[in-house]
């Protein structure tokens, strides 16, 4: 049962201690929510209601032999330790002496069972006194709790980086934290109880925080706004450049506005960070849009989750790529380099300058130099790949063009001598591996000097191209026709013995002889029969094969062919009889 505090002063005037009124008083006392005792001038307990006995834990036996004396009750309590440690006689003496002083008193006492009592006593005229006992355990607990919560709240408010202020419905400042003064740079002199919202407004208005204008008007305007107790949120830039975000909302109790709470956040660092991020983004946008680059991110399944700048290189909008696997955008044919990239991705390894071949939306092929690294989340779980690709299509084309130029004779587009030497090494290995013959033909146009002399160098060049074409047409795809220099051609015949080499050489010779070249000018037209002489050399099985040896032998054959009248095929080794 909760007891409501009832004060002895309230009851004392009602009490007169004549015997006739005692029964009605005792009856009334039983209806009180508090404990009540009435002690007469002889210090005997006349009334001690049930609530009092219950609160004090007094047994009924104490009352069986008539009204106990005040001293008996005190002794009973002292002996059971209600007043703590100590000699009961001494304790009783002290209490009796206090009671005899006949003074109003209020004190609190904690009982051993944890109950906290508030005891108020008021002396009665004519002797004795009335005492009221209230159980204030819960009330004290509530006060303790609210003190504790207030301490928590204060600590929380003081720890916040935002300034916080609370004003009551009369615009008095009732609560604020240190940050409030710091964020608004308010003078310390205002950091005192009783300060009003208006005083703060005046400080701000006078120092120009609200911009140019009449401070009185600025304050009045803000006061009238504040009186509306409407929620608001706005930013204000202070004269020193600090940007504040101010958020306010009304506080109400049972639908009644009782105040207004505002928070003041210095958002300057966020604004600066925001501007820095915007700047970095703009730089990145420019870097991506002005360079042949795009940035991408894949999920753990290899599907695009992000791509920026891909449109200009791959022809797809980001939305067309996001959610689809990288593999679906690759060209069907990839090189060795691409496979290395794909294998690194599979093995979740970072890679640099790897080449990938994409198929553009319009079907074209794009080469990119790709750089990527795996991504992991905070729990170290693999979540995908991120990277930057650079369009190297033009570079790749230029590179292959350069390679072509390095390997090719510009006049006839046949392989040049470097390509021949390179290929020769490969074919030597192959010939050894497969125990095959490797043959070499050296072909030289007959009397080419006189062709040049008669018809000019341009026509000579034309003849060289025509002969090159015929040579190329007369051999297999695996054979390599090269222009070795001047009007001299070398044909490499893999997997070809001397008999085979003779056949090919003879076929070439006849093809050229039987295809005269036309020389036409505006004035005349002439058909010129061009012939070639060919020297042959074939490697021996299980013998080392040297280019210079084979070349020297074939050259010697060519020399003899020239000596023997040209337009013929000669090998130093006797031709096989058919
Ligand atoms: N038009 C043209 N002529 C070239 C080129 N390279 C070499 N020649 C010419 O080819 C001629 C080769 O002549 P020679 O080595 O004397 O031999 P030839 O006249 O063919 O006589 P034989 O080989 O003995 O039948 C020279 O006149 C060179 O200037 C070329 O790229 N274009």
Image (cartoon, rainbow, N blue to C red):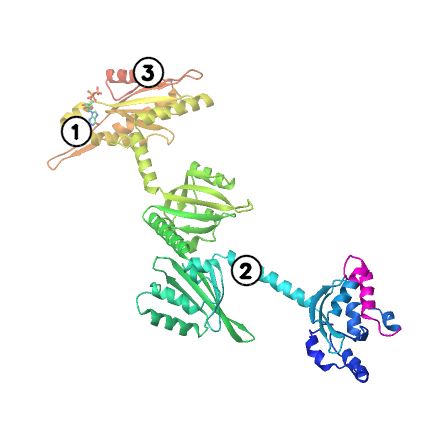
- Mark 2 surroundings within 10 Å by alpha-carbon count, few (fewer than 14), some (14 through 19), many (20 or more): some
The residue drawn where x is 33% and y is 17% is 548
164 with respect to 413 (left or right): right
Do labels 3 and 2 touch, CB within 8 Å? Answer: no
Q: Is mark 3 within 8 Å of ligand 1?
A: no
Q: Is residue 390 left or right of residue 65?
A: left
Q: Looking at the picture, tell me which residue is in the foreground, 301 or 296.
A: 296
Measure the C-alpha gap from mark 2 to mark 1: 103 Å
- Residue 536 in view (yes/no): yes
- Which residue in the structure is indicated by mark 1? 457
- The relative height of residue 307 versus residue 265 in the rendered view (above or below) is above
User: Does any portion of residue 506 appear in the rendered image?
Assistant: no
**Tag in front: 2 or 1:** 2
Q: Is label 1's Cβ within 8 Å of ligand 1?
A: yes
Q: Which residue is mark 2?
A: 154
Disc 3 marks which residue? 553
Observer-nearest residue: 73 or 419? 73
Q: Position of residue 61 (x, y in %)?
A: 87, 70
**Among numbered discs 3 and 2, the one appearing first in the sequence:** 2
Counting residues from the N terminus, which is met first, the one under dot 3 or under dot 1? 1
- Percent of width and height locating residue 37: 77, 74
Q: CA distance from mark 3 to mark 1?
A: 30 Å
Q: Residues within 10 Å of mark 3 (few under 14, many from 20)?
A: many
As helix, strand or loop, the secondary structure at mark 3 comes to: helix
Vertical side of 446 occupied by 72: above or below: below
- The image's mark for residue 361 is none
Q: Quadrant of residue 133?
A: bottom right
Residue drawn at x 49%, y 65% as measured from the top left: 193
- Give above or below for 55 relative to 321: below
User: What segment is highlighted magenta in the picture?
Assistant: 65-92
């Amino acid at each position: 049962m909760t007891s409501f505090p009832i004060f002895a002063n309230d009851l004392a005037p009602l009490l007169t201690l004549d015997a006739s009124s005692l029964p009605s008083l005792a009856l009334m006392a039983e209806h009180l929510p508090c404990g009540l005792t009435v002690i007469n001038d002889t210090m005997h307990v006349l009334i001690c209601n049930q609530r009092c006995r219950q609160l004090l834990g007094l047994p009924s036996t104490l009352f069986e032999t008539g009204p106990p004396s005040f001293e008996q009750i005190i002794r009973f309590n002292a002996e059971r330790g209600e007043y703590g440690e100590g000699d009961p006689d001494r304790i009783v003496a002290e209490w009796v002496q206090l009671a005899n002083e006949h003074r109003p008193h209020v004190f609190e006492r904690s009982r051993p069972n944890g109950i906290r009592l508030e005891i108020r006593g008021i002396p009665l005229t004519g002797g004795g006194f009335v005492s009221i006992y209230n159980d204030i355990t819960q009330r004290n607990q509530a006060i303790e709790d609210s003190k504790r919560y207030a301490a928590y709240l204060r600590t929380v408010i003081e720890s916040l980086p935002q300034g916080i202020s609370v004003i009551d419905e009369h615009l008095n400042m009732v609560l604020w934290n240190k940050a409030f003064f710091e964020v608004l740079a308010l003078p310390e002199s205002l950091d005192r109880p009783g300060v009003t919202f208006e005083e703060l407004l005046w400080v701000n208005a006078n120092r120009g925080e609200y911009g140019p204008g009449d401070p009185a008007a600025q304050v009045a305007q803000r006061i009238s706004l504040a009186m509306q107790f409407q929620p608001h949120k706005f930013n204000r830039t202070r004269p020193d450049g600090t940007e504040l975000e101010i958020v306010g909302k009304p506080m109400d109790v049972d639908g009644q506005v009782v105040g207004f709470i505002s928070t003041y956040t210095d958002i300057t660092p966020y604004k600066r960070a925001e501007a820095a991020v915007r700047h970095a983004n703009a730089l990145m946008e420019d870097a991506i849009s002005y360079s042949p680059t795009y940035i991408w991110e894949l999920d753990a399944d290899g599907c695009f989750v992000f791509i920026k700048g891909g449109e200009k290189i791959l022809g797809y909008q980001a939305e067309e790529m996001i959610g689809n696997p990288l593999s679906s955008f690759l060209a069907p044919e990839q090189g060795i380099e691409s496979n290395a990239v794909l294998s690194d991705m599979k093995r979740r390894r970072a890679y640099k300058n790897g080449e990938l071949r994409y198929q553009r939306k319009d079907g074209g092929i794009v080469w990119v130099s790709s750089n990527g690294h795996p991504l992991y989340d905070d729990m170290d779980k693999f979540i995908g790949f991120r990277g930057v690709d650079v369009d190297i299509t033009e570079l790749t084309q230029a590179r292959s063009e350069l390679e072509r130029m390095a390997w090719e004779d510009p006049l006839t587009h046949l392989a040049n001598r470097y390509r021949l030497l390179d290929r020769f090494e490969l074919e030597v290995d192959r010939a050894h591996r497969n125990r095959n013959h490797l043959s070499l033909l050296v072909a030289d146009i007959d009397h080419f000097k006189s062709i040049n002399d008669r018809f000019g160098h341009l026509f000579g060049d034309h003849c060289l191209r025509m002969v090159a074409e015929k040579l190329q047409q007369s051999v297999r795809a695996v054979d390599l026709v090269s222009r070795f220099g001047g009007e001299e051609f070398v044909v490499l015949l893999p997997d070809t013995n001397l008999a085979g080499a003779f056949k090919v050489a003879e076929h070439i010779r006849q093809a050229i002889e039987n295809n005269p070249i036309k020389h036409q000018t505006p004035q005349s037209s002439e058909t010129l029969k061009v012939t070639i002489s060919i020297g042959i050399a074939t490697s021996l099985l299980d013998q080392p094969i040297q280019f210079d040896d084979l070349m020297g032998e074939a050259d010697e054959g060519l020399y003899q062919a020239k000596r023997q009248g040209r337009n013929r095929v000669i090998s130093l080794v006797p031709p096989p009889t058919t």
